[in-house]
Amino acid sequence: MPTEEEQHRLNAGLAEVPRHVAVIMDGNGRWAAQRGKPRTWGHQEGARAVRAVVTRARELGVPWLTLYAFSAQNWRRPADEINALMALLIEFCQKERQLMMDKDIRLRVIGQRDRIPAPARFAAETVERATRDNRAMTLQIALSYGGREELVSAARQLVADALAGRIDPEDVDESALSARLWTAGAPDPDLVIRTSGELRVSNFLLWQIAYAEFVVDPRLWPDFGAADLDEALRTFAARERRFGAVRAPVR
Ligand code: IPE
Ligand code: IPE
Ligand code: MG
């Protein structure tokens, strides 16, 4: 008998799913503008897409899902848009906490925690604590996240550790650096999905995506749903990853 997750994969035409899927959720503002509405309305509708994609990823048995919700550069946006996004984060944490408990999902925030306003940080950290022992899936939400900022923070820690004698500079290697990133302990993403058709990385997981496959979907984020995730995973399954070798490594 196939497990429930295997059954969902079979139905979706998927033999297997990536270990880590990372998503640049882009296009909320344009989605709203196309309908003559304020950008914040697009973010609200975007939150529904988040729910749909988290639920589907969990159903399919994807162990790691990272969602880019707010970049370190998004602080450049108008205050009312930032406030609306923080309010949506609080609402998401309150509304989805039970879903995460029921579905055995662990929440983890990655990014500049100290820049997140206290009420939003508190809401996220409350769910992080409540879900810390959940194991089926880790949902990483990137908040005030920037890949360069993360690398600078890791470099600072390495220097501090070296000066304090906790690490020999000769021992600084990829794993020493990885261990000091906000994503420490997470496998590197296998697949990055970006919606809204933009062909750029926008400071997302710069170190971690060294060998990730990219799927760019033309849909704006509020229009992205479970079936579109399935489609992206099928596209990924058809790719040949070589990691610099001549042929894909035998698994
Ligand atoms: C993505 O949608 C959500 C965030 C960056 C917070 P945007 O707000 O970037 O929407 P567009 O790209 O302007 O359409
Ligand atoms: C990337 O989208 C950040 C998030 C999706 C949170 P942006 O809309 O901020 O990226 P740019 O400005 O178009 O590169
Ligand atoms: Mg955008």
Image (cartoon, rainbow, N blue to C red):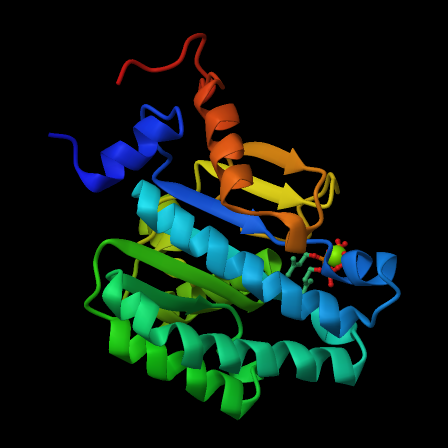
Task: Count the marks.
Answer: 0
Q: Residue furthest bottom?
A: 118
Q: Position of residue 170 (x, y in %)?
A: 34, 49
**Which residue is more in the foreground, 85 or 59?**
59
Residue 124's quadrant in the figure? bottom left
Residue drawn at x 58%, y 77% is: 88
Q: Is residue 149 left or right of residue 233?
A: right
Residue drawn at 34 percent across, 15 percent down: 249
Of all residues shown, which one is farthest toward the top?
Answer: 246
The image position of residue 224, as x and y in percent, is 61, 47
Name the quadrant of the N terminus: top left
Residue 115 seen: yes
* Observer-nearest of 122 and 241: 122
Q: Considering the image in quadrants, where does the C terminus appear?
A: top left
Asked if residue 22 lies left or right of residue 248, the reply is right
Instruction: Give the left or right position of residue 235, taking residue 71 as reference.
Output: left
Residue at the image point whose x is 30% and y is 64% from the top: 106
